Image (cartoon, grey):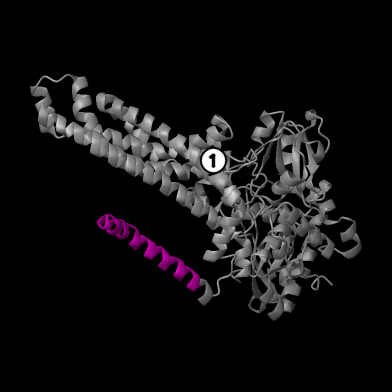
């Protein structure tokens, strides 16, 4: 359900699951684990409550399940936690780190957790399989998903992509879309390995990436990555989308509204001064160094505040965008037209 | 003739009835507990999905099967050869066998990406994973079969001044056949698992994809009925390979092993 391939690191923890993995597939978690080792799922650091926050016993406990290990793309949620915005709203939010194959959609659909974070394509896939889930806020208007190529290949855009080995996660929605949309002359598609090693070794190697992570790592290691954004060819699912289930929206709308408002406040804080949130992310996921997180937060800002978000406010979503994504998933044969449920997949009523 | 029909019915009927019970129970569970498709697909959804994706599955099963059979074949050859060396040179066995156990415990998801680095993407990478996973049972079976011999028979051969080669061909190899057949039955299932895991790391480049990639992809889209259809495909593949190995094994046991037995009585 998430964006990354399980391939990369975290292996030791998953060895016993080899068989389960096999039946379960590898998940479409993708993108880089620049450093590949097991990551203990630690509790995120709770910051001390601000003086004006209500006493602990009055807080409503809320769980938020991430789709991946804590990273910059979850920054706003950590900012809301670290700066006490959730507590001010009367919520005792516990952020649960995810990982490869985290069944976030299923957990939220079954009410095992209150809220989850996934990308818009996961929401549509879930709705298509009758999972009663609803997106309530989309912090990243522009998908950070990109393809890295070497500057020396002379490739300037995704439509010029040819004569390379392209490493992408087989299970990602964008992969199917690329295969559907681009000609890919003499492009050998291989599974994504989870880091930039192959990329650094091979001049004709291209790979999937998240714009705030791998380009930084590749450059730091002396590579010459050129970033080709997926959004440039129109594939642009809302990313790190906050979602919950139908039941919660029906029975506890005020709780959902508090969660949405406090999360938006967190994201506004994160793009302006991410330091405290980055420390919380680093504490929850020590693999993420503060310098890469700082780069990540800087890179995220234009993805959060595109023209639409500038005009309508952070977190906004539109019918046209959801419909376009559904059409793309249908056209690339990832979803059947009669199963698409755009209307039920999101609501903007908590954003006002 | 009617006796043969009755025998066939005795063989086929019980598993068929059991299968029907399982499918009915599965369907009932979905209706009674109102399980949504994102958790469990219904049997007819799986069937419909298998039919809808028949073309993809029709490519995936032989692709994965070819890799699994190649890995299994390599395991059979290399495992038996290693067993031969172990049985002939005790010191080799003593120094290397402990490391062969490493194969048994090797965390395949950890080394699979490395195997891909060494062997490359595509078919050969998939075969490498399948091979590593299916090798150990053959080594063990061959080594046991070639070394665990009735001491009286060894003495008998010694009394008759049999050469080492004669002892190997007339005594040790026939003794190893039943072991090898058992080892092969375990190994061939592992070879299929290895091929599917291998595909997750190494496959996915041509127009057609194997079962591993297919299942991963369907799983990502929460398309549980397609996942089940893919798992069903891999099960059918395993059963087909297992059945072939079993039949071949029984034939070999009956012919060669039996003939070897007769040899010793007529001599």
Locate residue B256, reporting x and y percent: 24, 33
- Asked whether, in this view, residue A268 is left or right of residue B12, the answer is right
Q: Is residue B37 above or below residue A73?
A: below
Locate residue A285, reporting x and y percent: 63, 52
The 10 Å Cα crowd at callout 1, few under 14, some 14 to 19, many 20 or more, is some
Q: Is residue B143 above or below residue B29?
A: above
Residue named by callout 1:
B63
Locate residue B94, reporting x and y percent: 28, 29
Secondary structure under tag 1 reads helix
Q: Is residue B233 above or below residue A339?
A: above
Q: Does residue A16 appear in this view?
A: no
Residue at the (82%, 50%) spot, across then down? A234
Residue A136 appears in which quarter of the rendering? bottom right
Q: In terms of depth relative to the viewer, which is nearer, B111 or A265?
A: B111
The quadrant in which the C terminus of chain B is found is: top left
- Asked whether, in this view, residue B137 is left or right of residue A118, the answer is left
**Farthest bottom residue in view:** A251
Prevailing SS of the magenta stretch: helix
**Farthest left residue in view:** B159
Residue A327 appears in which quarter of the rendering? bottom right
What segment carries the magenta color?
B1-29
Q: Does residue B14 appear in this view?
A: yes
């Amino acid at each position: 359900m998430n964006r990354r391939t399980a391939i990369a690191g975290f292996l030791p923890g998953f060895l016993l699951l080899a068989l389960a993995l096999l039946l379960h597939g590898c998940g479409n978690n993708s993108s880089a684990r620049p450093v590949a080792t097991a990551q203990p799922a630690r509790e995120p650091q709770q910051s001390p409550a601000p003086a004006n926050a209500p006493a602990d016993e009055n807080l409503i406990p809320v769980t938020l399940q991430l789709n991946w290990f804590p990273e910059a793309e979850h920054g706003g949620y950590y900012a809301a936690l670290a700066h006490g915005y959730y507590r001010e709203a009367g919520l005792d939010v516990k952020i649960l780190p995810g990982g490869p194959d985290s069944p976030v959609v299923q957990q939220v659909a079954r009410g095992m957790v209150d809220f989850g974070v996934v990308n818009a394509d996961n929401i549509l896939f879930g709705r298509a399989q009758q999972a009663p889930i609803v997106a309530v806020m989309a912090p990243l208007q522009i998908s950070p998903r990109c393809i890295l190529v070497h500057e020396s290949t002379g490739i300037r855009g995704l439509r010029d992509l040819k004569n390379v080995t392209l490493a992408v996660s087989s299970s990602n929605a964008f992969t199917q879309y690329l295969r559907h949309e681009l000609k890919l002359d003499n492009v050998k598609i291989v599974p994504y390995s989870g880091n930039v090693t192959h990329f650094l070794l091979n001049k004709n190697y291209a790979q999937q990436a998240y714009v705030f992570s791998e380009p930084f790592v590749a450059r730091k290691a002396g590579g010459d990555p050129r970033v080709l954004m997926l959004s440039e060819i129109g594939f642009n699912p809302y990313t790190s989308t906050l979602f919950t289930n139908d039941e919660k929206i029906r029975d506890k709308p005020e709780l959902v509204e508090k969660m949405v408002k406090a999360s938006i406040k967190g994201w506004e804080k994160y793009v302006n001064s991410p330091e405290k949130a980055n420390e919380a992310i680093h504490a929850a996921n020590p693999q993420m160094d503060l310098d890469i997180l700082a780069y990540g937060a800087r890179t995220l800002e234009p993805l959060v505040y595109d023209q639409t978000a500038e005009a309508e406010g952070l977190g906004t979503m539109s019918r046209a965008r959801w419909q376009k994504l559904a059409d793309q998933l249908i056209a690339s044969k990832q979803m059947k037209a009669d199963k698409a449920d755009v209307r039920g997949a999101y609501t903007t009523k908590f954003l006002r | 003739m009617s006796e043969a029909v009755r025998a066939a019915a005795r063989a086929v009927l019980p598993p068929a009835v059991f299968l029907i019970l399982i499918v009915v129970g599965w369907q009932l569970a979905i209706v009674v507990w109102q399980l949504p498709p994102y958790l469990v697909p219904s049997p007819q959804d799986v069937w419909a999905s298998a039919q809808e994706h028949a073309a993809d599955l029709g490519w995936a099963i032989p692709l994965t099967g070819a890799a699994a059979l190649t890995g299994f074949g390599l395991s059979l050859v290399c495992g038996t050869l290693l067993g031969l060396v172990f049985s002939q040179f005790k010191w080799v066995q003593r120094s290397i066998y402990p490391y062969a156990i490493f194969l048994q415990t090797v965390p395949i998801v950890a080394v699979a990406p490395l195997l891909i680095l060494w062997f490359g993407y595509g078919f050969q990478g998939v075969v490498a994973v399948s091979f590593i996973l299916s090798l150990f049972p053959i080594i063990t079976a061959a080594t046991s079969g070639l070394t665990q011999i009735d001491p009286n028979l060894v003495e008998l051969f010694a009394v008759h001044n049999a050469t080492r080669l004669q002892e190997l061909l007339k005594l040790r190899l026939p003794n190893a056949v039943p072991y090898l057949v058992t080892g092969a039955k375990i190994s061939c299932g592992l070879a299929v698992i290895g091929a599917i895991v291998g595909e997750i790391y190494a496959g996915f480049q041509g127009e057609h994809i194997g079962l591993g990639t297919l299942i991963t992809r369907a799983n990502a889209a929460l398309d549980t009925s397609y996942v089940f259809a893919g798992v069903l495909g891999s099960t059918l593949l395993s059963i087909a390979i297992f059945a072939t190995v079993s039949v071949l094994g029984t034939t070999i046991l009956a012919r060669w092993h039996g003939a070897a037995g007769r040899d010793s009585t007529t001599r």
